[in-house]
Image (cartoon, helix red, strand yellow):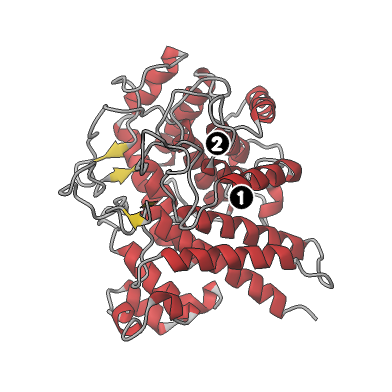
Amino acid sequence: MSIKKIMENARFEKLLSGGNIPEKALKDRIFKDLPVRDKLLVAYKHLENLRQMNGGYIASEYCGDKGGDRYNVFWLRDIMYATYANEYVGAYDRMIESYRLILRIFQKYRGKITGGARKRSYLGSCANEIMHARIHPVTLEELTSEWGHHQLDIFGLFLYKTGDLMKKGHNVIGTDQTETLILLRDIVLYLTTVRWHSAPDFGVWEEGPETHASSIGAVLAGLTMWHDDGYYHHKYKTQVPIHQHIPIPQEFVEIGRRTLDDLLPRESASKPYDLAQLSLIWPYNIISDAQARQLLDNIEQNLVRKKGLIRYPGDLYYNADRSAPAGNEAEWPLGFAWLSIVYSQQAVRALRLGAVFSPPTEYIEKAEHYLDRLESVMTDDGRAPELYTDGNPNYNIPLAWAQSFYIVARQNLNRVYERMNRLP
């Protein structure tokens, strides 16, 4: 079903207003056996259950009562990825509300952004002057400084997606644009001053400090989106000159790209490959075709497991046997969704480039394959767990951005099917 048809569908409208369609759809059936339309409705309803009144998404409903960290709080990265699903069902108002919440949080801790820029370097894991990645969902207060909060990819993702939405004609920055643009310039100043292209951070998985390819790529994508170099022009029907708002030094774009090229195909000094590197292909599309192929080969050959992808070899987080971590790593269903999205994107791109008489069958089959594998490890009522350890899921069911990525993956395949149906 197309995005437009979904948004016009009365059942989807009823779902957004709080209807009980998922329960009806699942009556006497399990999620993976539902029609595609109902799968989207059910999956989106589960995601909406994690959305808060202020537009943010808690990472999961788990409150920590069975041990471990509570996840019913905000992670800044999780919010930005969780709301991605809204774009793919046409609910831009919800997505914009989420990004404006991130803006509010950045404004609240703006002193840390400007203070961090003055440091010029950063090696600590929990210094008070660093923006925290985990926030209380109501008060927006920082929750802990117990682990690495210096995560450059959060700023890169924010710059990339706000620029993308603005180029698509959506007013993300609100009515008080002067104050917001000053904040965005502060973020750029912070990134360029702390030498993001060579400085270690804690990356997507909050581990380090190391120089991470995924972090470099995220910031490079964010700066490139706002820089007038034409790199992303092909994505937009009209060119909105957002580069006039924020001065992005050409030098830092060039240095960042060289640094990323030098580090790839590794994720970091300690990790030859990493699940987070898929972000360099989607959403950022910031690497060459040859680099993307190398990353995909590395990830598919080394990280794919029965119930998901491991984040990297030897990962200790929820490891089934920490005394012998290799082969006992937690398996993330999120990885199946991410691979499906990447291959659907490649299929769409091939069709756009003229693969009319020779459709990109391999890409389509891989996108379907990984989406099928994801659905096989989701719960019977359509929720995507954070991870599996020794064949069992943990308590974070669903994980917000995994649930979102399922919806994106499903809608990406729908786009491929629609294009295929238009072929002669």
Quarter placement of the N terminus? bottom right
Q: Nearest the camera: 83 or 288?
A: 288
Q: Position of residue 137 (x, y in %)?
A: 24, 46
Which numbered marker is on residue 214? 2
Is 346 situated above or below 144? below
Q: Is residue 388 left or right of residue 187?
A: left
Q: Which residue is denoted by mark 1 in the rendering? A: 300
> Which residue is at 19% across, 46% downward?
64
Compare residues 184 and 128 and report the one nearer the observer: 128
Residue 90 in sight here: no
Q: CA distance from mark 2 to mark 1?
A: 17 Å
Number of marks present in the image shown: 2
Query: Compared with residue 99, is residue 156 higher up or lower down, i.e. above or below?
Result: above
The amino acid pointed to by label 2 is Ser
Give the image quarter of residue 255.
top right
Q: Is residue 414 left or right of residue 401?
A: right
